[in-house]
Amino acid sequence: MINTYDIYLISDSTGETLERIFLAIKAQFKSFKYKTHFYSFTRTENQISKILESSEMSKNSIVLYTIVDNKLAKFLSDKCNKKKIPCFGILGDLILRFSRLLDQEALHVPSRQHIMDDDYYKKIEAIQFTMNHDDGNSVDDIDKSDIVLLGVSRTSKTPTAIYLANKGMKISNIPLVNENSVPETLKKNPTKKCIVGLTAEPERLVDLRKNRMQSINENENKNYINLDTVQKEMEDARKLFQKYKWPSIDVTRKSVEETAASVLKIHEIFNQK
Protein backbone atom coordinates (compact mmCIF):
# COMPACT_ATOMS: atom_id res chain seq x y z
CA MET A 1 0.00 0.00 0.00
CA ILE A 2 1.38 3.40 -0.99
CA ASN A 3 1.47 5.97 1.81
CA THR A 4 -0.06 9.38 1.35
CA TYR A 5 2.33 12.11 2.43
CA ASP A 6 1.29 15.43 3.93
CA ILE A 7 3.51 18.04 2.29
CA TYR A 8 3.76 21.30 4.23
CA LEU A 9 4.93 24.18 2.04
CA ILE A 10 5.88 27.05 4.32
CA SER A 11 7.01 30.38 2.84
CA ASP A 12 7.71 33.85 4.18
CA SER A 13 6.51 35.30 0.86
CA THR A 14 3.95 34.30 -1.78
CA GLY A 15 5.29 30.73 -1.93
CA GLU A 16 5.46 30.74 -5.72
CA THR A 17 9.11 29.63 -5.78
CA LEU A 18 8.48 26.87 -3.26
CA GLU A 19 5.45 25.59 -5.13
CA ARG A 20 7.34 25.36 -8.40
CA ILE A 21 10.24 23.53 -6.79
CA PHE A 22 7.89 20.99 -5.22
CA LEU A 23 6.16 20.43 -8.58
CA ALA A 24 9.57 19.75 -10.12
CA ILE A 25 10.41 17.29 -7.34
CA LYS A 26 7.15 15.35 -7.39
CA ALA A 27 7.24 15.04 -11.18
CA GLN A 28 10.25 12.73 -10.79
CA PHE A 29 8.26 10.06 -8.96
CA LYS A 30 5.57 7.87 -10.52
CA SER A 31 4.01 6.62 -7.29
CA PHE A 32 3.84 9.64 -5.03
CA LYS A 33 0.55 10.20 -3.27
CA TYR A 34 0.43 13.47 -1.41
CA LYS A 35 -1.73 16.20 0.02
CA THR A 36 -0.33 19.72 0.15
CA HIS A 37 -0.79 22.20 2.99
CA PHE A 38 0.22 25.66 1.83
CA TYR A 39 1.25 28.50 4.19
CA SER A 40 2.36 31.82 2.70
CA PHE A 41 3.65 34.97 4.46
CA THR A 42 4.82 32.96 7.47
CA ARG A 43 7.07 35.39 9.32
CA THR A 44 6.75 34.74 13.05
CA GLU A 45 7.61 31.91 15.44
CA ASN A 46 4.00 31.91 16.61
CA GLN A 47 2.77 31.20 13.07
CA ILE A 48 5.22 28.32 12.73
CA SER A 49 4.26 26.85 16.10
CA LYS A 50 0.59 26.86 15.13
CA ILE A 51 1.35 25.11 11.84
CA LEU A 52 3.41 22.38 13.48
CA GLU A 53 0.93 21.87 16.28
CA SER A 54 -1.85 21.25 13.77
CA SER A 55 -3.84 18.08 14.40
CA GLU A 56 -3.35 17.26 10.71
CA MET A 57 0.39 16.68 11.16
CA SER A 58 0.99 12.96 10.62
CA LYS A 59 3.93 10.61 10.75
CA ASN A 60 4.08 10.94 6.97
CA SER A 61 4.49 14.72 7.05
CA ILE A 62 7.29 16.46 5.16
CA VAL A 63 8.12 20.16 5.49
CA LEU A 64 9.61 22.23 2.68
CA TYR A 65 10.26 25.90 3.31
CA THR A 66 11.60 29.11 1.85
CA ILE A 67 12.38 31.45 4.76
CA VAL A 68 15.21 33.96 4.39
CA ASP A 69 15.37 35.00 8.05
CA ASN A 70 18.06 32.71 9.50
CA LYS A 71 16.70 32.81 13.06
CA LEU A 72 13.17 31.93 11.93
CA ALA A 73 14.43 29.19 9.63
CA LYS A 74 16.42 27.66 12.49
CA PHE A 75 13.35 27.83 14.74
CA LEU A 76 11.36 25.87 12.15
CA SER A 77 14.14 23.34 11.61
CA ASP A 78 14.62 22.77 15.36
CA LYS A 79 10.89 22.32 15.91
CA CYS A 80 10.71 19.76 13.11
CA ASN A 81 13.73 17.88 14.43
CA LYS A 82 12.10 17.57 17.85
CA LYS A 83 8.98 16.17 16.22
CA LYS A 84 11.09 13.96 13.92
CA ILE A 85 9.53 15.53 10.84
CA PRO A 86 11.73 15.67 7.70
CA CYS A 87 12.38 19.35 7.01
CA PHE A 88 14.14 20.88 4.00
CA GLY A 89 15.12 24.50 3.46
CA ILE A 90 15.12 25.31 -0.25
CA LEU A 91 17.01 28.62 -0.32
CA GLY A 92 19.13 28.62 2.84
CA ASP A 93 22.27 26.84 1.62
CA LEU A 94 22.16 28.60 -1.75
CA ILE A 95 21.93 32.06 -0.16
CA LEU A 96 24.80 31.19 2.20
CA ARG A 97 27.01 29.94 -0.62
CA PHE A 98 26.25 32.97 -2.80
CA SER A 99 27.04 35.19 0.15
CA ARG A 100 30.49 33.60 0.40
CA LEU A 101 31.09 33.71 -3.36
CA LEU A 102 30.02 37.36 -3.64
CA ASP A 103 31.77 38.26 -0.38
CA GLN A 104 28.78 40.19 0.92
CA GLU A 105 26.00 39.71 3.42
CA ALA A 106 22.60 38.70 2.13
CA LEU A 107 19.74 41.08 2.96
CA HIS A 108 17.45 38.33 4.32
CA VAL A 109 14.37 40.39 3.42
CA PRO A 110 11.21 38.42 2.45
CA SER A 111 9.55 39.15 -0.92
CA ARG A 112 12.56 40.99 -2.33
CA GLN A 113 11.89 39.30 -5.70
CA HIS A 114 8.50 41.03 -5.81
CA ILE A 115 9.66 44.62 -5.42
CA MET A 116 8.18 47.05 -7.94
CA ASP A 117 11.38 48.01 -9.77
CA ASP A 118 12.05 48.64 -13.46
CA ASP A 119 11.93 44.92 -14.25
CA TYR A 120 8.53 44.62 -12.57
CA TYR A 121 7.03 47.47 -14.61
CA LYS A 122 8.63 46.08 -17.76
CA LYS A 123 6.81 42.79 -17.14
CA ILE A 124 3.49 44.58 -16.57
CA GLU A 125 3.97 46.52 -19.81
CA ALA A 126 4.78 43.29 -21.66
CA ILE A 127 1.66 41.57 -20.33
CA GLN A 128 -0.54 44.50 -21.35
CA PHE A 129 1.06 44.62 -24.82
CA THR A 130 0.61 40.88 -25.29
CA MET A 131 -3.04 40.96 -24.26
CA ASN A 132 -3.67 43.82 -26.70
CA HIS A 133 -1.94 41.89 -29.50
CA ASP A 134 -3.63 38.55 -28.97
CA ASP A 135 -5.28 36.67 -31.84
CA GLY A 136 -4.20 39.06 -34.59
CA ASN A 137 -5.26 42.29 -32.88
CA SER A 138 -3.39 45.62 -33.14
CA VAL A 139 -1.09 44.59 -36.00
CA ASP A 140 -0.38 48.23 -36.86
CA ASP A 141 2.39 48.37 -34.26
CA ILE A 142 3.53 44.76 -34.54
CA ASP A 143 7.09 46.06 -35.02
CA LYS A 144 7.17 46.76 -31.29
CA SER A 145 6.90 43.03 -30.58
CA ASP A 146 9.91 41.12 -29.30
CA ILE A 147 8.49 37.92 -30.80
CA VAL A 148 5.66 37.13 -33.23
CA LEU A 149 3.95 33.75 -32.96
CA LEU A 150 2.14 32.28 -35.98
CA GLY A 151 -0.05 29.20 -36.06
CA VAL A 152 -3.39 27.72 -37.01
CA SER A 153 -6.17 27.49 -34.43
CA ARG A 154 -5.42 25.50 -31.23
CA THR A 155 -1.62 25.50 -31.49
CA SER A 156 -1.22 27.11 -28.03
CA LYS A 157 -0.42 30.59 -29.33
CA THR A 158 -2.23 32.54 -26.60
CA PRO A 159 -1.06 30.56 -23.53
CA THR A 160 2.50 30.56 -24.86
CA ALA A 161 2.32 34.31 -25.47
CA ILE A 162 1.00 35.00 -21.96
CA TYR A 163 3.68 32.79 -20.41
CA LEU A 164 6.40 34.67 -22.32
CA ALA A 165 4.83 38.02 -21.37
CA ASN A 166 5.27 37.07 -17.73
CA LYS A 167 8.97 36.89 -18.49
CA GLY A 168 8.92 40.46 -19.81
CA MET A 169 8.61 39.69 -23.53
CA LYS A 170 6.22 41.62 -25.78
CA ILE A 171 4.42 39.05 -27.91
CA SER A 172 2.05 39.30 -30.86
CA ASN A 173 0.26 36.17 -31.99
CA ILE A 174 -1.33 35.77 -35.40
CA PRO A 175 -3.88 33.06 -36.26
CA LEU A 176 -3.18 31.50 -39.66
CA VAL A 177 -6.02 30.91 -42.07
CA ASN A 178 -3.91 31.40 -45.20
CA GLU A 179 -0.93 33.48 -46.29
CA ASN A 180 -3.10 36.59 -46.39
CA SER A 181 -3.48 36.27 -42.60
CA VAL A 182 0.14 37.35 -42.18
CA PRO A 183 0.61 41.15 -42.00
CA GLU A 184 2.35 42.58 -45.07
CA THR A 185 5.09 44.13 -42.95
CA LEU A 186 6.21 40.66 -41.85
CA LYS A 187 6.22 39.27 -45.39
CA LYS A 188 8.12 42.26 -46.76
CA ASN A 189 10.78 42.01 -44.05
CA PRO A 190 10.64 38.34 -43.00
CA THR A 191 13.94 38.42 -41.08
CA LYS A 192 13.51 41.77 -39.35
CA LYS A 193 11.55 40.36 -36.39
CA CYS A 194 11.87 37.12 -34.46
CA ILE A 195 8.96 35.16 -35.96
CA VAL A 196 8.18 31.63 -34.79
CA GLY A 197 5.66 29.24 -36.27
CA LEU A 198 3.77 26.77 -34.08
CA THR A 199 2.70 23.44 -35.57
CA ALA A 200 0.99 20.30 -34.27
CA GLU A 201 -0.11 16.89 -35.48
CA PRO A 202 -3.51 17.22 -37.25
CA GLU A 203 -5.09 14.41 -35.20
CA ARG A 204 -4.20 16.22 -31.99
CA LEU A 205 -5.59 19.50 -33.34
CA VAL A 206 -8.87 17.83 -34.24
CA ASP A 207 -9.24 16.55 -30.68
CA LEU A 208 -8.48 19.98 -29.23
CA ARG A 209 -10.89 21.68 -31.59
CA LYS A 210 -13.67 19.23 -30.77
CA ASN A 211 -13.22 19.99 -27.07
CA ARG A 212 -13.24 23.70 -27.84
CA MET A 213 -16.48 23.43 -29.82
CA GLN A 214 -18.15 21.47 -27.06
CA SER A 215 -17.15 24.05 -24.48
CA ILE A 216 -18.80 26.87 -26.45
CA ASN A 217 -21.73 24.77 -27.72
CA GLU A 218 -20.67 25.23 -31.34
CA ASN A 219 -21.78 22.50 -33.74
CA GLU A 220 -22.05 24.24 -37.11
CA ASN A 221 -18.49 24.53 -38.40
CA LYS A 222 -17.77 20.96 -39.55
CA ASN A 223 -14.67 21.94 -41.53
CA TYR A 224 -13.04 23.15 -38.33
CA ILE A 225 -12.81 19.55 -37.09
CA ASN A 226 -12.53 17.76 -40.42
CA LEU A 227 -9.24 15.82 -40.44
CA ASP A 228 -8.57 16.34 -44.16
CA THR A 229 -9.16 20.08 -43.79
CA VAL A 230 -6.90 20.30 -40.73
CA GLN A 231 -4.16 18.32 -42.50
CA LYS A 232 -4.31 20.82 -45.37
CA GLU A 233 -4.14 23.73 -42.92
CA MET A 234 -1.07 22.26 -41.29
CA GLU A 235 0.60 21.50 -44.61
CA ASP A 236 0.01 25.07 -45.81
CA ALA A 237 1.32 26.48 -42.54
CA ARG A 238 4.56 24.48 -42.81
CA LYS A 239 5.02 25.57 -46.42
CA LEU A 240 4.53 29.18 -45.35
CA PHE A 241 7.15 28.91 -42.61
CA GLN A 242 9.58 27.33 -45.07
CA LYS A 243 8.89 30.00 -47.70
CA TYR A 244 9.86 32.84 -45.38
CA LYS A 245 12.47 30.77 -43.50
CA TRP A 246 10.70 31.16 -40.17
CA PRO A 247 11.66 28.57 -37.56
CA SER A 248 8.83 26.42 -36.25
CA ILE A 249 8.09 24.32 -33.17
CA ASP A 250 5.91 21.21 -33.03
CA VAL A 251 3.84 21.70 -29.88
CA THR A 252 2.02 18.34 -30.04
CA ARG A 253 3.80 16.81 -27.05
CA LYS A 254 5.08 19.98 -25.44
CA SER A 255 3.72 21.78 -22.41
CA VAL A 256 3.31 25.55 -22.64
CA GLU A 257 6.46 25.92 -20.52
CA GLU A 258 8.47 23.72 -22.89
CA THR A 259 7.16 25.56 -25.95
CA ALA A 260 8.01 28.91 -24.37
CA ALA A 261 11.53 27.71 -23.55
CA SER A 262 12.01 26.66 -27.19
CA VAL A 263 10.72 30.05 -28.38
CA LEU A 264 13.15 31.85 -26.07
CA LYS A 265 16.01 29.75 -27.43
CA ILE A 266 15.07 30.77 -30.99
CA HIS A 267 14.85 34.41 -29.85
CA GLU A 268 18.32 34.15 -28.32
CA ILE A 269 19.78 32.77 -31.56
CA PHE A 270 17.93 35.44 -33.57
CA ASN A 271 19.52 38.22 -31.50
CA GLN A 272 22.99 36.78 -32.05
CA LYS A 273 22.77 37.30 -35.81
Image (cartoon, rainbow, N blue to C red):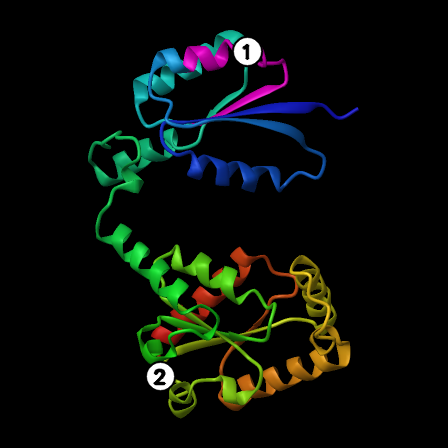
Judging depth in this view, the residue of 29 and 254 nearest the camera is 254
Can you give x and y, in whole percent of width and height, for residue 33 in the image?
68, 30
Which is more N-terminal, label 1 or label 2?
Answer: 1
Q: Residue at x 75, y 76 (%)?
A: 226
| Residue hosting label 2 | 192
Can you give x and y, in whole percent of width and height, for residue 252 in the image?
65, 65
CA–CA distance in space, label 2 to label 1: 60 Å
Q: Amino acid at mark 1?
A: Lys
Residue farthest to the left?
104
Judging depth in this view, the residue of 227 and 163 nearest the camera is 227
Can you give x and y, in whole percent of width and height, for residue 39 in the image?
45, 25
Q: Which element type, helix, strand or loop, lies under badge 2?
A: loop
Can you give x and y, in whole percent of width and height, for residue 135 in the image?
48, 71
Where, by quadrant of the figure, is residue 85 drawn? top right
Q: Quadrant where the C terminus lies?
A: bottom left
Range drawn in magenta: 48-65
